[in-house]
C-alpha cells in the first residue's frame, strides 16, 4: 500500500540542494514533481548559461527503457525517423505520430547497446507504447524515478566537468554518450541539451544525486556556475529555436477540438520523417500531406520592438492568419523572437506580418500592432555548440 501523502508532491534526488539555492521560493509542478521556476533572478540565470555554466534539474523528464530482440523494429514503427541510422552510444531527436500523421510527442532516444534504448519525452505515454508494441518481443518500463539527471550547459560546462575529473569529456561529439567513474559508481554523460549552447546532460542513480551536485558546484566555483529554473530555460530554448510539447503544439492524444493537432510538416520538422523505411505510424497520412500540401506552417518571426508577442494573433493586412505559441526578448541575439503557426500560404521566408501584442504596465493595458517578418531559422546558433574538441573557456 502506498503511504498516504496529502500533498502527493514528488521530490527529485536534487531537491534538498535546489531548495537551499531557491532564494525566491518560486516553484512549479512538472509531472508531479516540484521544481524551481526561478532560483534567484531570471536574467542572471539566463546569462549564466550563455556566459558561464548553468545547471538544470531534469530528473522529472519522462523516461522509458526499451529493450529486447525486437526493440529496434518496435521503435522504427513508433517514430518517423529511421532508428537503424542511430549507432550504439549515440542519441538523436525524434517524434512519433498517430495514424492521422499528427504529432503525439517529441523527445530524444539514447541507444545504450545493440537492443537497449532509453526514450526521454514530455508526455506520459506508456499506454501508447504498449499498444504500438503488440506483436514485438520487447520490454518497456518507465524509469523516470530510477534515473536522476542534471543538464550542465554553457561555455564553461566542459571545463567544469574536466575539473570534476571527467578526463576526455572534451572529445565527446554532439549527441554522443560517454561513461565516467564517480564516487564508486559510473555516470553516463551525453552531449545533449535544450539550451542551444555547448552543454551536457549527466545521468546517474538517484542515491548519487546530492553527492554529485555538491562536487559539481565545488568544481564550478571559479567558472561562474549557477542553478537555473524553468523560466530561464524557456528564454534559452526560444532563442535556440526549440519547440516544446504542450506549448508550441498540442500532443495529438490530448487534442479535444478537431484541427488543433499538427503534423511534422506543419511544425517545420519534416526533416524527421523518413519515407525510405517501409512502415511507421502515420506514414500513409504523411505521404498524402506531402503530395497535397500542408494546411499550416510553423515559422520563426522577428518582431518589431522589445515587447514579447506572447499569445498574440498574427495578421496579414486585416486578415487573421495565425497565432503565436512562444515569444521572448532574447538578450544574446538582441532579437524579439516568436514562434507562430500560420496559414501555409503566409509561411515563406521574408513574409511580412503583424502581431497584435497586449502588455500591462502599472494596471494599464497597451495594445501594439507590431510589424514582424518570417525568418529562416533560430537566431542563436553558436559554433561552440558543435565544436569538437569542445572549447576550454
Image (cartoon, rainbow, N blue to C red):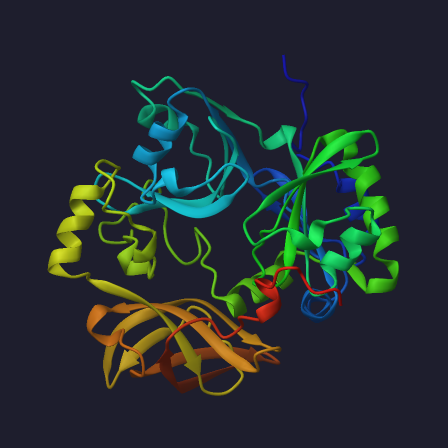
Residue at (69, 66) in percent of width and height: 42
Q: Is residue 98 above or below residue 337?
A: above
Q: Quadrant of residue 321?
A: bottom left
Q: Quadrant of residue 267?
A: bottom left
Nearest the eye: 149 or 30: 149
Q: Is residue 177 visible?
A: yes
Q: Is residue 388 left or right of residue 157?
A: left
Q: Is residue 292 above or below residue 99?
A: below
Q: Is residue 278 left or right of residue 29?
A: left
Q: Is residue 39 visible?
A: no
Q: Position of residue 49 (x, y in %)?
A: 69, 64
The quadrant of the picture occupied by the C terminus is bottom right
Q: Is residue 12 left or right of residue 193?
A: right
Q: Is residue 189 left or right of residue 308?
A: right
Nearest the eye: 124 or 119: 119
Q: Position of residue 225 (x, y in %)?
A: 79, 60
Q: Position of residue 339 (x, y in %)?
A: 41, 69
Q: Position of residue 27 (x, y in %)?
A: 68, 51
Q: Is residue 120 above or below residue 220?
A: above
Residue at (29, 45) in percent of width and height: 256
The quadrant of the picture occupied by the N terminus is top right
Amino acid at each position: 500500500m502506498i503511504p498516504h501523502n496529502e500533498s502527493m508532491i514528488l521530490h527529485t534526488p536534487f531537491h534538498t540542494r535546489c531548495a537551499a539555492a531557491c532564494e525566491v521560493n518560486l516553484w512549479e509542478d512538472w509531472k508531479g514533481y516540484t521544481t524551481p521556476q526561478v532560483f534567484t533572478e531570471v536574467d542572471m540565470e539566463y546569462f549564466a548559461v550563455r556566459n558561464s555554466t548553468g545547471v538544470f534539474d531534469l530528473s522529472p523528464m519522462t523516461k522509458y527503457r526499451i529493450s529486447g530482440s525486437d526493440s529496434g523494429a518496435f521503435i522504427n514503427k513508433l517514430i518517423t525517423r529511421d532508428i537503424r541510422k542511430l549507432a550504439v552510444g549515440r542519441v538523436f531527436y525524434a517524434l512519433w505520430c498517430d495514424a492521422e500523421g499528427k504529432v503525439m510527442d517529441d523527445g530524444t532516444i539514447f541507444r545504450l547497446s545493440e537492443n537497449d534504448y532509453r526514450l526521454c519525452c514530455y508526455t506520459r505515454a506508456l499506454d501508447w507504447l504498449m499498444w504500438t508494441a503488440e506483436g514485438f518481443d520487447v520490454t518497456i518500463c518507465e524509469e523516470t524515478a530510477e534515473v536522476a539527471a542534471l543538464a550542465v550547459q554553457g561555455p564553461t560546462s566542459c571545463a567544469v566537468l574536466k575539473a570534476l575529473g571527467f578526463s576526455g569529456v572534451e572529445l565527446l561529439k554532439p549527441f554522443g554518450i560517454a561513461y565516467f567513474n564517480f564516487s564508486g559508481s559510473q555516470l553516463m554523460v551525453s552531449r545533449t541539451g535544450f539550451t542551444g549552447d555547448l552543454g551536457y546532460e549527466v545521468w546517474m542513480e538517484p542515491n548519487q544525486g546530492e553527492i554529485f551536485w555538491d562536487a559539481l558546484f565545488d568544481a564550478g566555483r571559479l567558472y561562474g556556475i549557477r542553478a537555473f529554473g524553468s523560466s530561464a530555460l524557456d528564454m534559452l530554448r526560444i532563442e535556440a529555436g526549440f519547440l516544446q510539447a504542450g506549448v508550441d503544439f498540442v500532443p495529438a492524444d490530448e487534442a479535444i477540438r478537431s484541427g488543433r493537432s499538427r503534423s511534422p510538416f506543419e511544425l517545420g520538422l519534416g526533416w524527421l520523417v523518413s519515407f525510405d523505411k517501409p512502415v511507421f505510424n502515420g506514414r500513409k497520412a504523411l505521404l498524402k500531406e506531402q503530395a497535397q500540401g500542408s494546411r499550416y506552417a510553423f515559422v520563426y518571426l522577428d518582431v518589431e520592438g522589445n515587447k514579447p508577442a506572447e499569445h498574440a494573433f498574427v495578421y496579414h493586412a486585416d486578415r487573421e492568419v495565425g497565432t503565436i505559441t512562444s515569444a521572448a526578448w532574447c538578450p544574446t541575439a538582441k532579437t524579439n523572437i516568436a514562434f507562430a503557426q500560420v496559414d501555409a500560404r503566409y509561411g515563406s521566408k521574408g513574409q511580412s506580418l503583424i502581431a497584435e501584442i497586449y502588455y500591462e504596465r502599472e494596471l494599464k493595458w497597451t495594445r501594439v500592432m507590431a510589424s514582424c517578418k518570417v525568418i529562416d531559422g533560430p537566431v542563436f546558433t553558436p559554433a561552440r555548440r558543435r565544436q569538437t574538441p569542445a572549447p576550454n573557456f
